[in-house]
Image (tube, grey):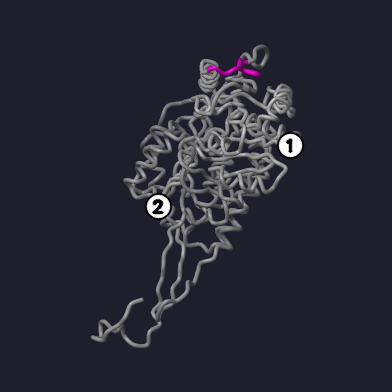
Amino acid sequence: MTLEQTLPICIAGHWRLGHGERYASRYPATGEPVAWLNAANLNDVEEAVQGAHQAFLHSGWAQRKPHERASVLYRIAALIRERGEELAQLQRQDNGKPIGETRALVASAAGTFQFFAAACETLEETITPSRGDFVTMSVYEPMGVVAAITPWNSPIASEAQKVAPALAAGNAVVIKPAEITPLLALQLARICEDAGLPKGLVSVLPGKGSVLGDALVQHPLIKRVSFTGGTRTGKHIAHIAAEKMMPVSLELGGKSPTIVLDDADLDHAVAGVLYGIFSSSGEACIAGSRLFVARSLYEPFMERLVAGAATLRLGDPADETTQMGPLISASHRESVERYVALGLAEGGTVRLGGQRPVGGIYDNGYFFPPTIIEGLTNSQQTCQEEIFGPVLVAMPFDDEAELIEQANDSLYALAAGIWTGDYKRAWALGRKIQAGTVWINTYKQFSISTPFGGWRDSGLGREKGRLGIVQYMEQKSLYWGMNEQPLAWASGHQGVAS
């Protein structure tokens, strides 16, 4: 297919053009189109959901034995690995991440399908302790059609974290990828079909989230929504879900504190703080964007941190040595620049970076350098709002009571990092910090086997973990009567319930 041609999208098992407007997926490093496709429209949403419902009812997928569903998920994992380099290069073009990072995300997606295949075929139902003349059981059954609404910063990995457990549970899935990064979701749908998943169980709806996502969430046949994205949109979804009495999982924003205590190993702490905020060009919900350093250590630590940040390689995502690629779009870079200007207006000073680079590839792509701002207090707007870019605010602290108060003084509570040589201090501080994930002497490490999610404005519910599969299932209790005589009440005899 040539660049001028328009990619088909996947609607209820059929590959055809969307009925919405034609638009381009653009390479953030150059601004040039990677592919053209027609967005889905509301008619496509209806067709996808109705088709998914019919596939759920009639394909036999929900009725397959768990090990039979697992075998398809294992094949999906194998095909992702087999096509790994192609997928990684496509994601590099779709959202501008360095090729090393996109390879890791593709590998993560394969691992996710493998993990939930194993979780599927080993999920145990329970015979619960008897409280009478009956045997009680707790079982799980699929919900029906679920919606997976995914962000632009980590395509395929985010899709896998939602699609794999939903399919393992026996559901059908409608994927709504971010408008500007649709290509990996479409490839995943192809892989699912090639692996033998019945047609119609996966659809992909590229286009505006405010239109398509809203229609999906409100659709009466959608039984669950898993959303990763902005807090404002997440709250809107939660309101709709409340009206429907529909469960949701919402992985939203963050303004995560990363903490360097006075006994930290500086080599590990500097490397971890740099990775925590500047990898992925800071476009990560768990980015360690608020840095608290013990005052006695502050200046020597900052000197090493600034020196390390200055050596990070910002450039072409196709270059194997690149550590930071461009931001996702021109408008997003402008948003990051506005936050830097706000930090200066609030009295901060830029210790490093703060201005877009110029010359060569920088003139066409949406690049922004590692930026470190000092001189602000935690209560100021720059320290409270999610920037979603390579901007770190650094602040000294004097004692741990002050530190805990400031670290927890945020609407967000997604993640945190602690750097210390004392495991007892790490334990005590880690339990007092309010966050869904706390990293100790490391940062931004993930395991599909470990639940992930946030508190407060960082979201609801959890993804990942062995029990992540039951988030996409309904729990049912079964009672098996074992009494020899008819129920006493109906026979006119007194009985006592307990």
Q: Which residue is mark 2?
A: 54
Q: Which residue is mark 1?
A: 268
Q: Amino acid at mark 1?
A: His
How crowded is the residue under tag 2: few (<14 C-alpha within 10 Å), some, or many (20+)?
some
Residue 110 point in image, percent of width and height: 63, 47
Q: Which residues are magenta?
A: 347-356
**302 and 192: which one is in front?**
302
Give the tally of numbered discs. Answer: 2
Depth check: 12 or 271 in front? 271
Magenta span contains residue 351: yes
- Residue 125, disc: none
Residue nearest the observer in this picture, 409 or 115: 409
| Amino acid type of the residue that numbered disc 2 sits on in the rendered structure | Gln
Among the 4 quarters of the image, the one containing residue 35: top right
Q: CA distance from mark 2 to mark 1?
A: 53 Å
Q: Is residue 264 magenta?
A: no
